[in-house]
Image: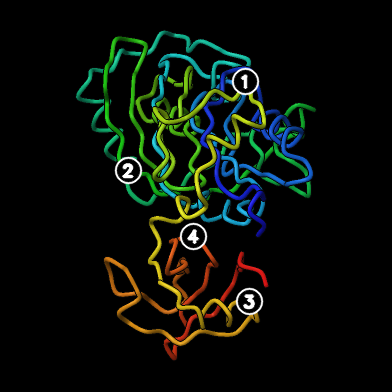
Amino acid sequence: MTQNELFGVLNLFKPAGVTSRDVVNTVQRLIRPAKCGHAGTLDPMATGVLLIGVGPATRLMTILQEGTKTYAAQFVLGQSSDTDDSTGQIWQHDPAPAIPDRESIEQHLQAMTGVASQVPPDFSAVHVRGQRAYDLARRGEAVELSAREVEIHSIRLLDYQWPCVELEIVCGSGTYIRSIARDLGRSLGCGGLMSRLKRTRVGNFSCSDAIPADNLTLDTIRSALYPAISAVQHLPQYDCSAKDVADLQCGRVLAVTDDRLRSDHPVAVDEQIALTAHDSRDLLAIAVITPDRRLQPRTVFVRR
């Protein structure tokens, strides 16, 4: 990397009414010829943390997408929609359903936590027969989506005044909050949809530290760019010697010196490890550990 090359992660606050792609395109226009990409789509109605990988850090976005996410959500009970949120065609349940009490809602939410099978909304970006599900749904075509395994770490009921439910949800990659609203409504027998969503955290990146996605400039991007190592703080880290750096530049496998490996748990075979520079802690590469205790580089950032 050259000294002036952009290489890092932007923590942006996406406003409602724009797509995640709109935000990426804005950043892309400002940083050309560098590339950028985001770490997890937010629906147009949603606000909150949108992480943008800039330059070579676009290759870290899959790692960020796999991280834990936290949301503040509002559900409305007694209603359903074709999109499972308030932007779609809404229908009231008739006859009017019985109003569930707080204890019942908490019990149903608790039953939804852990590793669960979840069907994405019909209006989602899931591929069906080579097309996005939302394209098929918009044309009125039948959409049959298979359930997928997701992990919901916790759901905390913050407030409940019929018909509105305020929640904090901590979940893993691939979880649809709209599906949680739909499934909660079905289990209560009254219907439910998502009316508001804010992503407050992705991994180590918080909403309170995000900068507005509107009115960006190149100078703003440069000053707000987090170093690439911040995207992989949750991974074990290995402190590379000068010889290791030279070997990385040649694509060689590295021998592991245990006292240079930093991890809060025993590192498993094929687990990803962040390789850092001894003098600066800059991110040099992502590697996996082999059965014979070597480091096999998978994504290398340091160049000759």
Estimate the spatial distance between the alpha carbons at disc 4 and disc 1, rounded to whole Å: 29 Å
Describe the element under mark 4 as helix, strand or loop. loop
Q: Residue at x 37, y 44 (%)?
A: 152
Residue 174 location, x and y as percent? Answer: 52, 46
Q: Nearer the viewer, residue 25 or 194?
A: 25
Estimate the spatial distance between the alpha carbons at disc 3 and disc 1, rounded to whole Å: 38 Å
Q: Mark 4 or mark 1, which is nearer to you? A: 4
Q: Mark 3 or mark 1, which is nearer to you? A: 3
Estimate the spatial distance between the alpha carbons at disc 2 and disc 3, rounded to whole Å: 45 Å
Which residue corresponds to mark 3?
249
Q: Nearer the viewer, residue 281 or 17?
A: 281
Q: Mark 2 or mark 4, which is nearer to you? A: 4
Q: Is the C-beta separation of discs 4 and 1 under 8 Å?
A: no
Which amino acid type is marked by label 3? Gln
Which amino acid type is marked by label 4? Asp
Which residue corresponds to mark 1?
214
Which residue corresponds to mark 4?
282
